[in-house]
Amino acid sequence: MSTLPAIPAKRYFTIGEVSELCGVKPYVLRYWEQEFTQLRPQKRRGNRRYYQHHEVLLIRRIRDLLYDQGFTISGARNQLSDGPAALGGMDPIALPSDEPMSMAELRIELLRLRDALADD
């Protein structure tokens, strides 16, 4: 698995930025929007897509499932709907305690919480 670049601390990312941050082509991102209902970037003038931090994390998760773990689109969709990563905005305390978080997942959750607190 290739190492992906760190995600900068900013609110919105263009499709080109997300493409570089996640190691997938822009047309793949547009296709994944159709296949994964959790992936809904904001669209503004000229139908330009703007992704938020949590969506970049979701795209990296999808990429991992498809490219690194070998899931099909349908299998990845099921994994996302079954696992803690699919819970998105849910309180992390409500996550099943029998599944320990990896350091990467913990860091992602801390960043998500930081962003949520910054919005308040």
Image: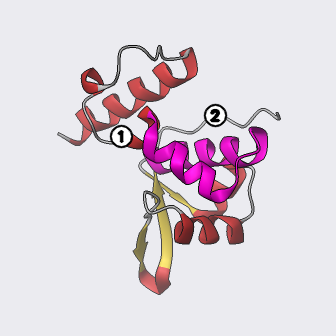
Marking on residue 6: 2
The structure's colour scheme is secondary structure
The magenta segment is: 54-83
Q: Look at the magenta stretch and give its main secondary structure.
A: helix
Three-letter code for the amino acid on which mark 1 is drawn: Leu
Q: Residue at x 43, y 64 (%)?
A: 40
Q: Which residue is mark 1?
A: 87
Q: From this view, report whether residue 38 is shown above or below residue 115.
A: below
Is 69 situated above or below 99?
A: below
N-terminal of the pair, mark 1 or mark 2, is 2
Relative image position of residue 104 (x, y in whole percent):
57, 22
Image coords of residue 81 (percent x, y):
44, 47
Q: Position of residue 18 (x, y in %)?
A: 62, 55
Q: Which mark is residue 43?
A: none
Figure quadrant of the N terminus: top right
Q: Are marks 1 and 2 in contact (CB under 8 Å)?
A: no
Q: Is 82 within the magenta?
A: yes
Residue 7 quadrant:
top right
Measuring 77% from the left and 44% from the top, which residue is drawn there? 70
Q: Image quarter for residue 27?
A: bottom right
Does residue 3 show up magenta in the picture?
A: no
| Rendered view: 58 above or below 1 | below
Q: CA distance from mark 1 to mark 2?
A: 23 Å
